[in-house]
Image: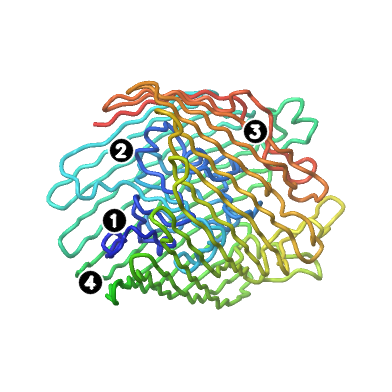
Amino acid sequence: MPVHSQEELAFSSLPPVFVSSTQTAAPEQDPPFSTTVITSEQIRKSGYTTVRDVLSKLALVNVRTPLDGSRSASVDLRGFGETASANVVFVVDGVKLNDNEGVTPRYGSIPVSSIETIEVIRGGNSVAYGSGASGGVVRITTKKGRGREGVGGDVFASYGSYDTKELGATVYGGANGFSLAFNGSKETTNGYRDNSEASRDLGSLALDWQGDVYSAGASFSAEGSKSRFPGVLNRAQFEQNPKQTNNPNDFGKFDRNIFRFYGIADYGSWGSGIRLSRRKHDSFGSFGGFPVPSSYEQDQISPYLTFTLKQGEGAHNVRIGYDIEKAALRGFNSGTLESNAVFIEDDWTVNEVVRINTGSRYERSEQQKLSGETREYSLLAHQLGVSWNAAEALTLYTKYSRSFRIPNADENGFAGFGTTQVPFLNPQVADELEAGFQTNLFSGEFAGSVFLMDVENELFNDPSVVISPFFSGANTNLDALRRTGGEFRWSGEIYNDLRLAMAYQYIDAEFRSGNQSGGRVPLVSAHNLKVSTEYDWNSKWSSEAIFDARSNQRAAGDTDLQVPGYGVLDINLRMREESYSLVLQVQNLFDKSYYRQQFQAGGIYPEIGRAVFLSFNSEF
C-alpha cells in the first residue's frame, strides 16, 4: 500500500509515466502508459478460470502455454521469445515470484476469485523491480477485505472438457479496523493430451489491520500440485494425432508456501513502511526415467520511505527504498544468490500539463555455485519519463529506461561446453526508448507506442554450439541484439450495446552479431492481432467473441524451422443476475490443430483443441 497514492497529488488527471514501485498501486481511473489494468469485476464477469486466460483474453497480451503442465504461461511483452518468462517480473502483493532458476513464475496457482487487480506494465522497469524486468512487469493484487465491515465473499464452480473440474471460494470479514480473508480452490483435469492429467490444491489466509496512522498485515498461502507431462511430438506425429504422447511415464509434483508481512506508517506529507516475505518450494519430476528433484528458498526484506514536496504549481512524490533478497536453489544446478539494492524515484507533477518521472537503482549481487565458485555483479538501472497534455483529449509521452537481468542458476549451470565453458555468464543490459500517445477516437480510447530496445550480453541458448552428434545448444551471452516495434490498442462502443477492443503488436527482433547475426529471435511473431467483441442482448444476457492471430515465427533450437502462423476463435455466452452469474465458454471453436512452440524438428508442443466450459459464480 502506498503512503501517498497518485490520487492525492495535484493535477491527478495527468497520467503518470508508469507505476513507480512494487508497493504503489496505479489508480484504476488513471493508469500509466503502456499499461493495462484488469479489475476483479472484469474477471468475474468474464468467467475465465485461470490467470493465463485473463492475461490473454482480457489484457490481450501474448502468452505461451507452459511445458511443465502448470497453469502459468510465459508472457512475452517485448519479443524475448523462449526467454520471455525470465524477462517479465511477476509481483503478487509486493512479492516477486521470479526464482533463481529457469522456470516460469508460478502465478497460475492464484485463484482468479481472489484477485483485486492485475496490472500489465510494458517496457523496462528495473529501477523499481530489479533484475528481470526488461520486458515488463505483471503485478497482481489480491483481495484483503481491508476496510470492510461484516462478512462476505463469493463461491465459484466450473466443469468442462476433459473432465476438468474446479471449485473455489473467497470469504472475508471485518470489524474495528481488522479484516480477515480466506481463499481456496481445488482443480482436477484429465488434460487434452494423453498423459496430461493434473490436480491442484490452493489456499491462503490474510489478516490486516488499518488505523489512522499505522497499518499492518500478514498472510500465508500454500499450494500443492501433481501433473503428468505428455512431452513433444515430431511433425508427422502432430499431424496424425496431436493428443498422443511419447512420454507416458513422465510426471511432476510441486509444493510451495509463502509468508508475507507488511507494516506502514502514514504521517501525511511523509511516511515509511516495510515488507517481508519468505517462500519455499519443493518439486520433483521424472523425465524419461531420469529423476529431477529440487528445493528453493527465498527471503525478501524491503523497507522504504516516501515524502511529498510542494514546488511551484506542482509537487514531488519521492520514494526511497532498499531491497534485500536471498535465494538458495538445491537441485540439478544448485546455487545461491544474494542481492542488496537501493533505489530512488521522483514522480514530479510540474503543472497541469507536464509530469516527469525519474529514478535510479544500484544493485550489488553475489552468486555462488555448489562447487564454491562465486561471482559479484554491480549493476545500475535508470529511468526518465515525460508526459504532456497536448490537448484536452490528447496526451503524449516519452520514456527512456535502462534495465538488467542477472543470469539464473540454470543458465550458469550450462554455460558453454568444453573450452568455451565459463562458470558464470555476464549480466544482460537493455536500453529502451519509447514514445506514445493516448487520445479519443471514434467514440473510444486509442493508445499507441513505438519502441527501440538495444540489448548487450543477451542471455540466450545458442543452438549453433554442437556438443555431440546427438545434442547441441548451450547458454551464452550475445554481443548485441536490437528490437523495434509498435503497439496499438483501441476500445470503445461501436453501436448500441456492442463493444470492441483491439490490440495489434509489431516486433522486429533481430540478432546483430555472432553465429545468429541477421536471424530472427526464436518464438517471436512479427505480427500479433487480438480482437474482442462483446454484445449485451439485454440486461441479463451478453456474448463475446475473441479472435487471436499471429504470423509465423522461427523455431527454437533450429534456424531452418518455422512455426506456422495461426488464427483461433473463442466465444463466450454469459448470464448475470444481481448476485450470481453463469458463463459458457467455447475455446478454439473450429478445433484448429496448431502449436506455438517448437524446439528442433522433434520438439512440437501442441495447443489444446476445442474445449467447452461452464462456470458459476455467486456473491454473498
Q: Nearer the viewer, residue 347 or 100?
A: 347
Q: Secondary structure at mark 3?
A: strand
Residue 499 in sight here: yes
Which of marks 1 and 3 precedes in the sequence? 1
Q: Is residue 165 left or right of residue 476?
A: left
Which kind of residue does numbered mark 2 sit on?
A: Thr
Which of marks 3 and 2 precedes in the sequence? 2
Distance from disc 2 to disc 4, alpha carbons, whole Å, reads: 35 Å
Distance from disc 3 to disc 1, alpha carbons, whole Å, reads: 44 Å
Which kind of residue does numbered mark 1 sit on?
A: Ala
Mark 1 crowd level (few <14, some 14–19, many ≥20, 10 Å Cα):
some
The residue under label 4 is 269
Which of marks 4 and 2 precedes in the sequence? 2
User: Residue 205, relative to residue 329: is it above or below?
Assistant: above
Which kind of residue does numbered mark 4 sit on?
A: Ser
Q: Which mark is residue 567?
A: 3
